[in-house]
Image: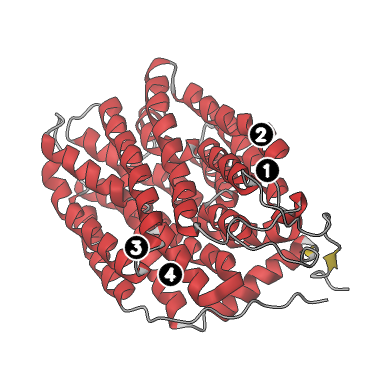
């Protein structure tokens, strides 16, 4: 047997009777809570950059480097995490990821040098959040649902926005009242508090409970054997999937578009909106409140995008989302001021609706083109998302240090969105490949 050998399934034949409440919805709910618990650090850098700069005198570029490494690892670990979930189960990987996030956030209170910040903010939290990235949502959706996939992926994707909504105002107030170290401990507590819930209620696959996926007719044969193996086998699977996907133009179109998506969300707005608003005289807590409003409308936009993905060509959706984002970024430099004006509220609403609305149609296209390997391929597409975010985070910091403002960064991002819209609109249709047989 190789590292990709299989064990016998833990459950017997799939039961044929219909349940009034399918357990897939319980799994989806627990996954949503886990994503919320892991989202604390996604809200933290923008709020904590100013206090760290004031206490240690570090430059914006130095702080951005730690965030950039986090964003890069957040994406690069995702495809390997997806493969590990296939090999060792969703529950075990998720619990370990939440622990690493909590440990990284807790240890960050002891930092005294930029290198130590890179180790905690960058490496540890990057590895943990990367394992809880959007590929987690894609894996849950494809494993537990045969129908309603667009809607479920939209709801789970919105979990990160919900976490931002919950944590961002709390972190901003805590940073002012008890200091940035106390705010970091709040992030750690949020991640660690979810671990028992995940361990008790999250299940790896429908066959564990003797059911079919939601919306799928119950098979008349025993459950499909569950792949098992070593971590190296999981890494090999992830790399093999990348090699195969990279031979297609569609993969590169999705990767380019998603890299621009990451640059214009996590890399720019998520990291630099609060410092940029602070440059214009706006209070940090006020700017954090605006970013939290992005989270509110992100929930609405992403869930609605998932609903649309089940009904509309995802290529059209992606092109529209990127175009709308680009137009809004063109106006941002003229909207920022010391006071909250109605125009900046309009920007926040539009950007919130569009924030990660790109995720459900991107997951759908990965599934359409790559079939059963869709979640793994999406992991690599998401890696491109975070590479774009990491590069944008550093470059925006450099622009701010050299010019004293972020204006050029906002305009460059608007131009990139136009490129993403064009690339997405030209993705051609593919028939979904047949499921790959399980190798003995």
Question: Mark 3, mark 2: which one is toward the viewer?
Answer: 2
Residue under the point 22% across and 53% down: 410
**Circle 4 residue:** 255
Q: Closer to the camera, 210 or 407? A: 210
**Circle 2 residue:** 197
Q: Is residue 222 left or right of residue 72?
A: right
Q: Where does the C terminus fall, quadrant-wise?
A: bottom right
Whether residue 376 is visible: yes
Q: Which mark is residue 164?
A: none
Can you give x and y, in whole percent of width and height, for residue 252 in the image?
43, 76
Are the residues tagged 2 and 1 within 8 Å (C-beta)?
yes
Q: Please tell me how crowded label 4 is: few (under 14), some (14-19), or many (20+) other residues with Cα within 10 Å.
A: many
Disc on the earlier residue, 2 or 1:
2
Disc on the earlier residue, 4 or 3:
4
Q: Closer to the camera, 426 or 390? A: 426
Please tell me whether residue 345 is drawn above or below residue 385 in the rendered image.
Answer: above
Can you give x and y, in whole percent of width and height, for residue 349 in the image?
23, 42
Question: Mark 3, mark 1: which one is toward the viewer?
Answer: 1
């Amino acid at each position: 047997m190789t590292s990709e050998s299989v064990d016998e399934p833990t459950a017997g034949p799939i039961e044929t009777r219909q349940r009034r409440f399918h357990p897939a919805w319980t799994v989806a709910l627990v996954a949503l809570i886990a994503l919320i618990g892991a989202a604390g650090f996604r809200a933290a850098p923008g709020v904590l950059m100013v206090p760290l700069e004031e206490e240690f005198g570090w430059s914006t570029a130095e702080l951005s480097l730690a965030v950039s490494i986090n964003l890069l690892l957040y994406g690069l670990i995702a495809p390997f995490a997806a493969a590990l979930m296939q090999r060792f189960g969703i529950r075990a990987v998720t619990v370990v990821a939440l622990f690493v996030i909590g440990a990284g956030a807790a240890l960050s209170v002891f930092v005294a040098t930029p290198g130590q910040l890179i180790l905690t903010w960058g490496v540890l939290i990057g590895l943990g959040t990367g394992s809880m990235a959007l590929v987690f949502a894609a894996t849950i959706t494809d494993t537990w649902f045969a129908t309603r996939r667009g809607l479920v992926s939209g709801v789970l994707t919105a979990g990160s926005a919900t976490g931002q909504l919950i944590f961002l105002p709390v972190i901003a107030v805590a940073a002012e009242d008890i200091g940035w170290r106390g705010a970091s401990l709040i992030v750690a507590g949020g991640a660690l508090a979810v671990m028992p819930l995940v361990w008790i209620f999250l299940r790896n696959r429908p066959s564990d409970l003797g059911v079919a996926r939601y919306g799928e007719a119950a098979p008349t044969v025993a459950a499909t054997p569950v792949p098992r193996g070593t971590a190296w086998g999981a890494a090999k699977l992830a790399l093999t999937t990348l090699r195969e996907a990279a031979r297609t133009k569609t993969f590169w179109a999705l990767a380019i578009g998603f890299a621009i998506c990451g640059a214009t969300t996590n890399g720019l707005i998520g990291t630099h909106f609060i410092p940029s608003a602070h440059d214009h005289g706006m209070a940090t807590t006020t700017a954090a409140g605006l970013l939290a409003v992005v989270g509110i409308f992100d929930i609405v936009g992403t869930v609605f995008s998932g609903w649309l993905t089940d009904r509309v060509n995802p290529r059209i959706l992606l092109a529209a989302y990127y175009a709308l984002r680009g137009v809004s970024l063109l106006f941002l430099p003229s909207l920022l001021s010391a006071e909250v004006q109605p125009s900046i509220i309009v920007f926040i609403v539009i950007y919130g609706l569009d924030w990660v609305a790109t995720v459900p149609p991107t997951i759908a296209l990965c599934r359409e083109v790559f079939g059963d390997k869709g979640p793994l391929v999406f992991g690599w597409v998401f890696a491109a998302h975070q590479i774009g975010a990491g590069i944008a985070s550093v470059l925006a910091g450099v622009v701010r240090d050299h010019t004293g403002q972020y204006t050029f960064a906002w305009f460059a991002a608007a131009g990139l969105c136009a490129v993403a819209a064009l690339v997405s609109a030209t993705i051609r249709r593919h028939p979904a490949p047949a499921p790959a047989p399980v190798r003995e």
